[in-house]
Image (cartoon, rainbow, N blue to C red):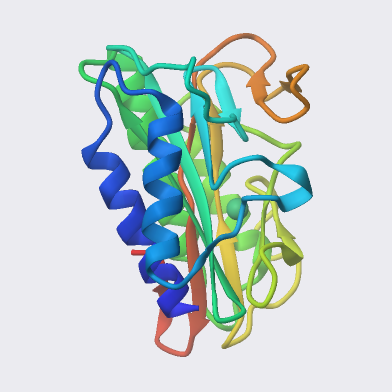
């Protein structure tokens, strides 16, 4: 999983360097698939329940699961969420981040900052002896104290020999509840944060999730192992 995580992190780094106005989202997908395949790994999203690409690209009010196409081009002022998974020798990793395209609004900057902070607040709770919803509550508190909302219809997840495993990892909940965290558990923690209301809808392509009120949305994700020494981020 650490090797799968390393490849995912390296892929995301390459994508970040290629984010600029005028770039086709399909080009970012080509970079993703090429990098993963040349490292003897497999883009885990490609073909997952029929998803057509190795990378999800979700722009502005798109929350997650946006499909890269040659028609969709990044524009100055957009925020773009990139989400990708890697399978390496039967083990999986999952990572996501939201980036500004050129100069973005103060609201967009704050949304990105708070969502990243919420991810790290959740990760800090990945300690043996804590409860799963300690992660959820830490994320929710960080988000809501900044005036934003956490998406509820979509959640993080266990990960390991499959991309999505139990347990679900919601980004809201009551601390002290849920399954006990134990050494060796591996979780994909992924706050999806809306600038407006938490309600979301799915577009007619059957994949792209958007905010119901048209507000901006950001998404950060790491694959994390619970160890006796605390959280170990596998996709750093
Ligand atoms: Mg995920």
Which one is in front, 142 or 98? 98
| Left or right side of 202 for 34 | left
Q: State whether residue 72 is above or below residue 125.
A: above
**The image quarter in which residue 211 lies:** top right
Which one is in front, 57 or 214? 57
Residue 115 x/y as whole percent: 43, 38
Name the residue at 60% across, 61% down: 134
Name the residue at 25% across, 35% down: 18
Residue 181 x/y as whole percent: 64, 78
Which one is in front, 54 or 81? 54
Q: State whether residue 180 is above or below residue 81.
A: below
Name the residue at 38% across, 70% down: 39
Q: State whether residue 100 is above or below residue 4.
A: above
Which one is in front, 146 or 76? 76
**The image quarter in which residue 160 lies:** bottom right
**The image quarter in which residue 66 lies:** top right
Residue 48 x/y as whole percent: 72, 52
What number of labels is visible? 0
Quadrant that contains the C terminus? bottom left
Q: State whether residue 73 is above or below residue 115.
A: above
Residue 178 x/y as whole percent: 76, 66
């Amino acid at each position: 999983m650490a090797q799968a995580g390393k490849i995912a992190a390296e892929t995301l780094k390459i994508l970040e360097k290629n984010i600029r106005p005028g770039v086709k989202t399909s080009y970012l997908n080509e970079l993703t698939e090429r990098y993963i395949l040349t490292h003897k790994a497999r883009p885990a999203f490609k073909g997952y329940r029929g998803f057509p690409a190795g990378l999800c690209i979700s722009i502005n009010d798109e929350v997650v699961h946006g499909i890269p196409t040659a028609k969709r081009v990044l524009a100055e002022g957009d925020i773009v969420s990139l989400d990708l998974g890697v399978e390496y020798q039967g083990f999986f990793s999952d990572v996501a981040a939201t980036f500004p395209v050129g100069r973005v609004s103060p609201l967009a900057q704050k949304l990105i900052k708070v969502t990243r902070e919420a991810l790290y607040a959740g990760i800090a709770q990945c300690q043996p002896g804590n409860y799963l919803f300690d992660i959820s509550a830490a994320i929710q508190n960080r988000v809501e104290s900044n005036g934003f909302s956490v998406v509820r219809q979509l959640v993080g997840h266990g990960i390991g020999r499959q991309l999505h495993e139990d347990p679900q990892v919601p980004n809201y909940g009551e601390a002290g509840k849920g399954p006990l965290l134990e050494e060796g558990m591996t979780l994909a923690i992924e706050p999806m944060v809306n600038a407006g209301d938490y309600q979301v809808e799915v577009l007619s392509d059957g994949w792209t999730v958007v905010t119901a009120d048209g507000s901006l949305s950001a998404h950060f994700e790491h694959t994390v192992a619970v160890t006796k020494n605390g959280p170990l981020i596998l996709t750093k």
